[in-house]
Amino acid sequence: QVRLVESGGGLVQAGGSLRLSCTASGRIYKVNNMGWYRQAPGQQRELVAAQADDGNTNYADSVKGRFTISRDNARKAVFLQMTSLEPEDTAVYYCNARGLTPTLIRFDSWGQGTQVTVSS
């Protein structure tokens, strides 16, 4: 019922930048949290950054100072500006959104994932 569409992944050299975008659509009354997770081969999915609807943000220690999350609440969109990328940032990045449908049922939806590859 809630669909997330991501874009912006790709291949970049170490030290470069990328910007990920994600837009939510469907039966949405309110989006509370939007965020980005990533999963590297053989690793568990981990939180990269998240932002609540009140603007509070949460970042993984490994990306603090390099990544910035932002939201456009009117468009139900979330963005991740990634700078000073490192090979260790290579992973599939997933968008996540949590909120309420018009019938006040909670949703917790994921995008299909976008590959980010950082070459050394």
Image: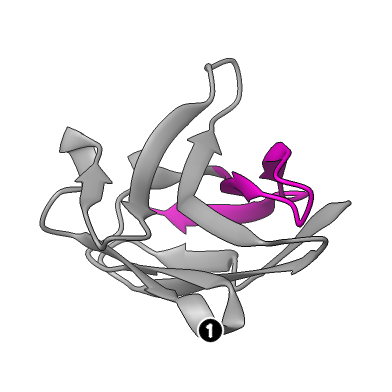
Residue 67 location, quadrant: bottom left
Q: Nearer the viewer, residue 38 or 3?
A: 3
Q: Residue 2 versus residue 119: which sits nearer the camera?
A: 2
Question: In the current view of this chain or complex, which residue is farthest to the left?
Answer: 65
Is residue 53 placed above or below 63 in the rendered structure? Answer: below
User: How was this image coloured?
Assistant: one colour
Task: Name the residue tied to disc 1.
Answer: 74
- Determine whether, in the image, residue 56 is placed left or right of residue 115: left
Question: Residue at position x 34%, y 47% from top?
Answer: 49
Q: Is residue 111 above or below residue 84?
A: above
Left or right: 13, with 109 as reference point: left
Q: Is residue 93 magenta?
A: yes
Query: Circle 1 sits in a helix, a strand or a loop, which is it?
Result: helix
Q: Which x, y percent locates residue 63? A: 22, 47
Q: Nearer the viewer, residue 114 or 42?
A: 114
- Measuring from the top left, give residue 33's x and y in whole percent: 45, 49
As for residue 102 lying within the magenta part, the answer is yes
Residue at horizontal 36%, vertical 48%? 50
Q: Position of residue 112 (x, y in %)?
A: 78, 49
Does 64 appear above or below 29? above
Q: Quarter of the image holding residue 108?
A: top right
The residue shown at (59%, 48%) is 99
Pick the front one: 74 or 65: 74
Instruction: State the extent of the magenta-drawn residues as a range.
Output: 92-120
Quadrant of residue 47 within the rendered picture: top left
Return the residue found at the far right. Answer: 1
Type of amino acid under label 1: Ala
Picture coordinates of residue 20, whole percent (x, y): 51, 69
The furthest residue to the front: 103
Give the answer, above or below, for where 57 lies relative to 25.
Answer: above
Q: Residue at x 56, y 65 (%)?
A: 11
